[in-house]
Amino acid sequence: MNEAEAIEIVRDALFTTIIVSLPLMLIALVVGLAISLFQALTQLQEQTLTFVPKILILFTAMVFLLPFMNGHLKVFTERIMDRIIAVGTGIDNGDDG
């Protein structure tokens, strides 16, 4: 394994992390903004109002997004395992460098 392959693996891992976590982060952002707007409009500054709805909505979203997240992580894991097998068996993947 050379330096370019290692950088490609790290880039692929970071991209997969972003793809998997982005939907939940966007949902948390939207819910947080909605709760903040509600608190600003009603002048209700209750701390539990910020955490409880966000936790419940994120948990529900996670249940629905788990197949999507699992699919991306499965594909990433298969790519990594294929690379490990290729290194272990000495198979060249066609890169002349």
Image (cartoon, rainbow, N blue to C red):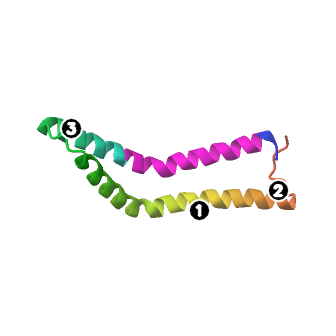
Mark 3 crowdedness (10 Å alpha carbons): few <14, some 14-19, many ≥20: few
Q: Secondary structure at mark 2?
A: helix
Q: Earlier in the sequence, mark 1 or mark 2?
A: 1
Q: Is residue 11 magenta?
A: yes
Q: From the viewer's perspective, tell me whether residue 30 is left or right of residue 25.
A: left
Separation (CA) of disc 3 from disc 1: 38 Å
Q: Is residue 42 magenta?
A: no
Where does residue 62 sit, x and y in percent of width and height?
A: 40, 59
Q: Earlier in the sequence, mark 3 or mark 1?
A: 3
Instruction: Write down the region rendered in magenta.
Output: 4-26
Separation (CA) of disc 1 from disc 2: 20 Å
Q: Which quadrant does the C terminus fall into?
A: top right
Mark 2 crowdedness (10 Å alpha carbons): few <14, some 14-19, many ≥20: few
**Amino acid type at mark 2:** Val
Q: Which residue is mark 1?
A: 74
**Amino acid type at mark 1:** Lys
Where does residue 25 sit, x and y in percent of width and height?
A: 41, 46
Q: Which residue is mark 3?
A: 37
Q: Which residue is mark 2?
A: 87
Residue at x-position 59% and y-position 62%: 74
